[in-house]
Image (cartoon, rainbow, N blue to C red):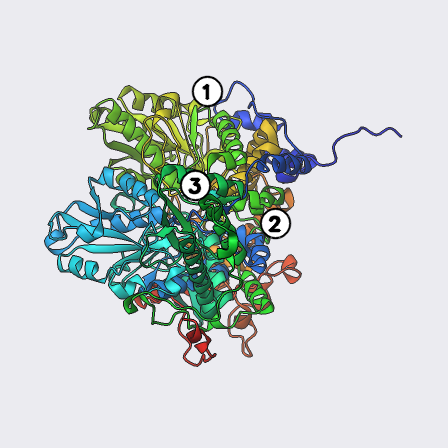
Amino acid sequence: MIFKIKPADVFKERHNGPDKEQIQDMLATIGANSLDQLIEETVPAAIRLKKPLNLPKALSERDFLNQFGKIVKQNKVYKSYIGLGYNDTIMPPVILRNIMENPGWYTAYTPYQAEIAQGRLEALINYQTMVMDLTGMEIANASLLDEGTAAAEAMAMFFAQRKGSRKNATRFFVSDQVLPQTIDVLVTRATPLNIELVIGDHREANLEDDTLFGAILQYPAADGEVFDYTDFITKAHAQDILVVVAADILSLTLLTPPGEMGADVVVGTTQRFGVPMGFGGPHAGYFATKDAFKRVIPGRIIGISVDAAGNRAYRMALQTREQHIRREKATSNICTAQVLLAVIAGMYAVYHGPRRLKYIGLNTHVLAQQLESGLKALGFEQQNEQYFDTLKITVESADMQHAIRTEAEAAGINFRYADATTIGISINQNTDLADVKNILAVFAKVAGKAADVLSIDALPEEAEITWPESLIRKSEFLQQEVFNRHHSEHEILRYMKHLENKDISLAHSMIALGSCTMKLNATAEMIPVTWPEIGALHPFAPADQTKGYQQLFTELESWLCEITGFDGVSLQPNSGAQGEYAGLLVIRAYHESRGDHHRNVALIPSSAHGTNPASAVMAGMEVVIVKCDERGNIDVADLRAKAEKYKEKLSCLMVTYPSTHGVYEESIIEICQIIHNNGGRVYMDGANMNAQVGLTSPANIGADVCHLNLHKTFCIPHGGGGPGVGPIGVVADLVPFLPGHAVVKTGGEKATTAISAAPWGSASILPISYAYIAMMGGEGLTEATKIAILNANYIKTRLESHYPVLYVGTNGRCAHEMILDCREFKKAGVEVEDIAKRLMDYGFHAPTVSFPVAGTLMVEPTESEAQEELDRFCDVMISIREEIREIEAGKADQKDNVLKNAPHTMKAVMVENWERPYAREKAVFPMAYLRENKVWPTVSRIDSAYGDRNLVCSCAPIESYNENNNEMVAVG
Ligand SMILES: *Cc1c(COP(=O)(O)O)cnc(C)c1O
């Protein structure tokens, strides 16, 4: 026998679901001779790329991990005492393995389908409760993108809520002790809204100035000093000025929380609750406020409601799908947030509980005290009167600072060097006495002192906190049961598994969410994320320690340029919506650079995603809606008329391609030309990039800017609603305006200020997209696009006789997704919601509900699903259609049927007296496979309105809980 030698493992054959035979079979089903013929019928010739993608040859999983391992070895993992909002921490291994490295958690989608998301919703309620308790506030959201943007959201919320004597005020006070990257993000957000920032010392702020509407303070301050802000806040309130305090979450275990000082909003990051620094992200920013603001809070809030059986159930409060994004009326564009990171930080608090959290805070503070006494003994001066974890050392000269820096770096240590003669040192959970000694050794050497001052051998049994009484936290926190019972590893392991088991993720079944591209998140792509060379770096570490990251950024940027056809990329935005905002600011800066300050009209088609108009408003633009025709395409005549009407004021068009209706509009080139002819630029929303890669590109169709959702097209998992990464690509003349950063240089020569707190945004998850491109290669990526289109058309063919398909291209083909019209079922009393809930009984997560057309489902299978899974999904959809037909035919009751009562829980069907007009079997085992493999929703249909009327957003305190919490007293 002669065998042909081929590599046993080719990654694209693992990433793409269907094999060769399945592809042939599916092509036959849809009536196409070949994949290429299908693509010709689907993608208009005028927009097709002329050349194949020029990317490096595809690597196997093994070769990728070996090669990438070498690249990241160039990163140097030093001990970081830089602080400034990023502190080393210890992720409990049980959380690392069972949440962070667990696809049951990280591949889940945003919890809009609450009945099969109770696990992560409970984890998020825990997180919200943790934030509320520690900050001393009445309500908290389920995370924002980072501390900088959370602060900017607070400013925007205050601006929209200006009151009393400050109703028309336009200035916002910023303490000069706010973190530099936060100030940078505040500048970004303030400018388009014509908010003027007043930066200064809070002790000298003139609050009588009637042009001020709000203020922000940092607690502890950037240099480490802890101020009591009670007076400031009281005086501000007397003047109708609202105050946000950016607070360090760990310090709040010991310090009086800002809520008790009267703060209106408290923001910050929960990074140091077990989430690696990751060279800047992702981490969960937090946002907590007073009850009075509950209806205007940015982002998502999880609340408690009841299900159809009257049981307690969680769901997103005050909003159905994305209605919190208020389009033209928005003050925020948050869609994807940081769910996975919030879950991790919340679980860190569950695992440690109030007592251990306080110990972590105390250890950190006491080690800082020890370091201070050691440094004083060596003759150094420490400037902070009261500090939590950060010392501010002044040295006599720049030369001395330089000598200390040289010694420190030789010892693998990074401090903060804010100016030529100060050194900042922030202690963290990962610091111990040996580390304190190592720090002291550096200073001793430079001071020419002997090492005998280093004779600290153990933490003292008792420590004294010398802060004024008013700064010492007296109130208890995290007294709820959940934070006081999962403290052994078995308990937390089972709790996490218990929550995970309530949810549907990609580990169970395909999640065919149109526009959200829930494709494979391959394990080999995920592995580098938890390597220390990726996770343990501080975002402001010196450049010579981050060469591995620099290579990753440079290569990834160049590959994304090749894929989009653009000339420059910024990796900074932390979500698609932030990418939109960044891209619009680039366009704004471009117009301003040409003296065209008046160009502020953004044309946006009516079918656009809610974030588009929201981002435009935040960028200071006036939104003008363009009509769509009856086929879902942009009405070119209307577009032309509006572009001409606003010729003098036109800033840009925002357009999604292929359209949100799942069609490659043939007129796109003409559309872009109309905009260009009228002096505007074209922003392409790249959420649908999965239908373009290798076949066409944003630059090819005539766009000037686009964002890519790396958590859609480029394999970063959704994490249950975040993290995300939304880099933007731009044409050559816009490259100079790509976003910069206050601390680390990024972007072009005329860079806008920062979009995100970290210079490269969520740097630590970029290896996922890098790995995907490296292992697929240009050919593999292009094939993935073709198969995504094949899979969508296969579903279309199988379902179109059961569900009308809205909008198709000229040859009757859809792109990578399609809209199933469910509106005609209303006559039988069946709403699209009922179908979404019934899918749960079959073990499926619903496709996208009512976007972009109300009463429809948008289905996007992606290339990663094999034919078996596509068939299973289609069989289920057909089975549900039959169930609807029974109602239509009068064979089933209009109100009491399998759809209306879906989902069916175990509790609901195991009742003694089953009184439904249909069999229990039909309720829970409508198809054979379910007898073997059943996901049981744990709650029945949730009543959202009830929860909105009785808003509860935290876990209830359990009065009966009485574990002895007094051990702290000896130390605190
Ligand atoms: C997902 C999506 C967005 C928003 O992206 P996020 O990453 O969630 O901020 C914008 N537009 C469209 C069409 C989308 O599908």
* Residue closest to the eye, 900 or 372: 372
| Mark with earlier residue (2, 1) | 1
Q: Nearer the viewer, residue 634 or 201?
A: 201
Please tell me which residue lies in front, 60 or 416.
Answer: 416
Quick one: quadrant of the N terminus? Answer: top right
Classify mark 1: helix, strand or loop: helix
- Find residue 735 and name its label: none
Q: Which mark is residue 46?
A: 1
At x 47%, y 43%, the residue is: 279
Task: Report whether 330 appears left or right of 81.
Answer: left
Check disc 2 and report its element: helix, strand or loop: helix
Side of 17 where 658 appears, left or right: left
Res 338 visible: yes
Q: Quadrant of the C terminus?
A: bottom left
Going from the N terminus, do you reach mark 3 or mark 1 first? Answer: 1
Q: Report helix, strand or loop for mark 3.
A: loop
Q: Residue 637, how many percent across, how many down?
A: 29, 26
Disc 3 residue type (three-letter): Phe
Crowd band around label 3 with a 10 angstrom C-alpha radius: few (<14), some (14–19), many (20+): many
* CA neighbours of label 2 inside 10 A, class few (<14), some (14 to 19), many (20+): some
> What kind of residue is marked 2?
Arg
Q: Which residue is mark 3?
A: 540
Does the Cβ of the disc 2 residue fall within 8 Å of ligand 1? no
In the image, residue 708 sits, relative to residue 895, either above or below, namely above
Q: What x and y, as percent, mark residue 259?
A: 29, 63
Tell me how far mark 3 sits from mark 1, CA to CA.
46 Å
Pointer 2 residue: 872
Spatial CA distance of label 2 from label 1 is 36 Å
